């Protein structure tokens, strides 16, 4: 579908075939990002990976980011953060759900994801009691940054003096953008000063974070100070929200389908056994059905229903149509995942659709299958896919192993509201209220 957003030409890609054209066949022509004021400012004038236009500098920055932080080795090195935070999550849920009281699952899962990302980024100081006030302030800034990222502004669609004037005088977007940037910059500058302090103790397990890796690259003149801050911004905006909403949607779908909830729990408990207090990282690769649950959740509820917008670098073709240079390209992953020409009973939650005839999984996360694009594809595919999937599967496995889950008294399966709220990421419109009860074997310990 071709349209004009203000003065900006745009195409919306809503089929697997058209997505293949954009993300594979003509990926080199469609791999840039639009230069819009919100992402430009919060990325320190395009010093990041997620929102910067395509360039040789961007390619080198992405290569270093993947090698130094998002590699499989680095994922293994950061398991300590997930394990520490999942123990806190289990403890909080057990306390909050005592006496058959319902809990708001989102609150616990978002705090958990924030703890993981903060610890991985900054080390154990992020979870320290004396740091709580600064962390609370930072959460407010992140929430406002998500608003800046997802809001429509006049300059986005009228990239001229008139659009800039409208955002200054009428929409308030320019003032909000500058305030959020100043708050972000002040927090990251404070953290940089802490980690650059020569009197800081030597980094031990849990005290070293992504910021220390980035500082090392900065000292080697591979990253600028602004690039360090921009990449930290990407980490928080890209990881906390997307991981948490996926876990919540998965639990919502499972409690609406008790037979699938039982199947997933039976698998986890059979493989993990009764000799552990929780699921450990080594258990997760054995949980085949759980991985299908995560995939089916991402098919129906991709965290980013519209992938981060692309922009064409030169004239190209999409689905046989001419698309001029500097056209904005919006890939509708939500519609592609529910396309009835691709998926049988597309509105039904059926994890088994991801299992092949001989028990092998047919569709991988990182393999380019254009009917399933929760992480995008091509040059702009999400670089944090392995870390994100590992965290989601590990968390969901622990929730299913450690607790039996029920709806509050008086609610039936079909009473669970599945309406979506708008935004950069798609949240449930209403909170997910569930009653957690410790797994009977654990209650007997």
Image (spheres, grey):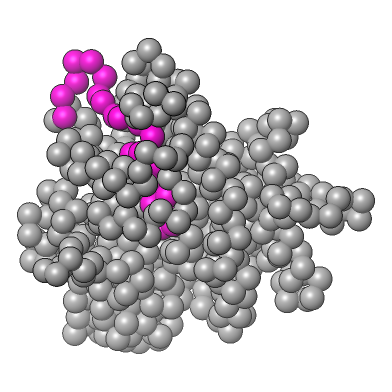
Q: Relative to residue 342, is residue 244 depicted above or below?
A: above
Indicate the quadrant where residue 378 lies: bottom left
Q: Position of residue 33 (x, y in %)?
A: 46, 71
* In the displayed structure image, the side of residue 93 where residue 366 appears, left or right: left
Q: Residue sitting at 48 percent across and 68 percent down?
A: 383
Residue 341 falls left or right of residue 361:
left
Residue at 46% x, 76% y is 32
Q: Is residue 436 visible?
A: no
As rendered, which of 13 and 171 lies closer to the eye? 13
Membership of 406 in magenta stretch: yes
Q: Residue at x 54, y 48 (%)?
A: 82
Q: Is residue 134 above or below residue 289?
A: above
Residue 388 location in percent, x, y? 45, 57
Comparing 34 with 333, the one in front is 333
Q: Of helix, strand and loop, which mostly describes the magenta segment?
A: helix
Q: Is residue 33 above or below residue 339?
A: below
Left/right placement of residue 339 relative to residue 106 reads: left
Q: Residue 321 placed where, x, y %? A: 21, 82
245 vs 71, nearest the viewer: 71
310 in magenta: no
Where in the figure is residue 206, as x and y percent of width and height? 69, 50
Q: Which residues are magenta?
A: 389-413
- Number of numbered discs overlaid on the protein picture: 0
Q: Residue at x 11, y 69 (%)?
A: 357
The C terminus lies in which quarter of the figure? top left
* Viewer can see residue 57: yes
């Amino acid at each position: 579908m071709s349209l004009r957003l203000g003065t900006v030409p745009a195409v919306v890609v809503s089929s697997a075939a058209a997505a293949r054209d954009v993300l594979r066949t003509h990926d080199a022509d469609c791999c840039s990002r639009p230069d819009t004021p919100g992402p430009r400012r919060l990325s320190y004038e395009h010093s990041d990976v997620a929102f910067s236009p395509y360039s040789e500098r961007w390619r080198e920055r992405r290569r270093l980011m993947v090698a130094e932080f998002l590699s499989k080795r680095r994922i293994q090195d950061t398991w300590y953060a997930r394990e520490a935070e999942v123990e806190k999550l289990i403890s909080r849920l057990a306390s909050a759900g005592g006496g058959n009281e319902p809990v708001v699952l989102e609150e616990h899962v978002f705090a958990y994801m924030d703890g993981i990302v903060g610890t991985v980024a900054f080390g154990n100081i992020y979870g320290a009691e004396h740091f709580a006030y600064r962390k609370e302030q930072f959460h407010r800034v992140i929430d406002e940054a998500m608003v800046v990222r997802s809001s429509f502004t006049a300059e986005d669609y009228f990239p001229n003096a008139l659009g800039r004037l409208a955002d200054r005088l009428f929409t308030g977007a320019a003032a909000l953008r500058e305030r959020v940037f100043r708050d972000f910059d002040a927090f990251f500058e404070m953290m940089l000063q802490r980690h650059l302090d020569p009197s800081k103790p030597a980094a031990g397990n849990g005290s070293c974070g992504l910021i220390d890796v980035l500082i090392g690259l900065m000292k080697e003149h591979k990253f600028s100070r602004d690039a360090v801050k921009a990449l930290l911004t990407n980490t928080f905006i890209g990881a906390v929200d997307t991981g948490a909403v996926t876990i919540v949607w998965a639990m919502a779908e499972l409690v609406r389908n008790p037979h699938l909830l039982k199947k997933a729990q039976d698998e986890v408990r059979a493989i993990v056994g009764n000799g552990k207090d929780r699921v450990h990282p080594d258990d997760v690769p054995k949980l085949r059905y759980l991985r299908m649950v995560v995939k089916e959740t991402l098919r129906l509820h991709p965290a980013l229903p519209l992938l981060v917008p692309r922009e064409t670098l030169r004239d190209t073709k999409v689905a046989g149509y001419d698309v001029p240079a500097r056209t904005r390209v919006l890939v509708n992953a939500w519609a592609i995942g529910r396309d009835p020409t691709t998926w049988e009973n597309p509105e039904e939650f059926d994890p088994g659709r991801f299992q092949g005839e001989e028990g092998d999984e047919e569709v991988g996360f990182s393999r380019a299958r254009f009917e399933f694009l929760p992480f995008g594809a091509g040059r702009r595919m999400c670089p944090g896919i392995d870390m994100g999937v590992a965290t989601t599967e590990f968390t969901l496995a622990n929730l299913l192993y450690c607790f039996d889950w029920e709806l509050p008294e008086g609610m039936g399966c079909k009473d669970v509201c599945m309406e979506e709220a708008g935004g950069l990421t798609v949240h449930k419109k209403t909170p997910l209220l569930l009653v957690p009860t410790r797994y009977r074997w654990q209650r007997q310990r």
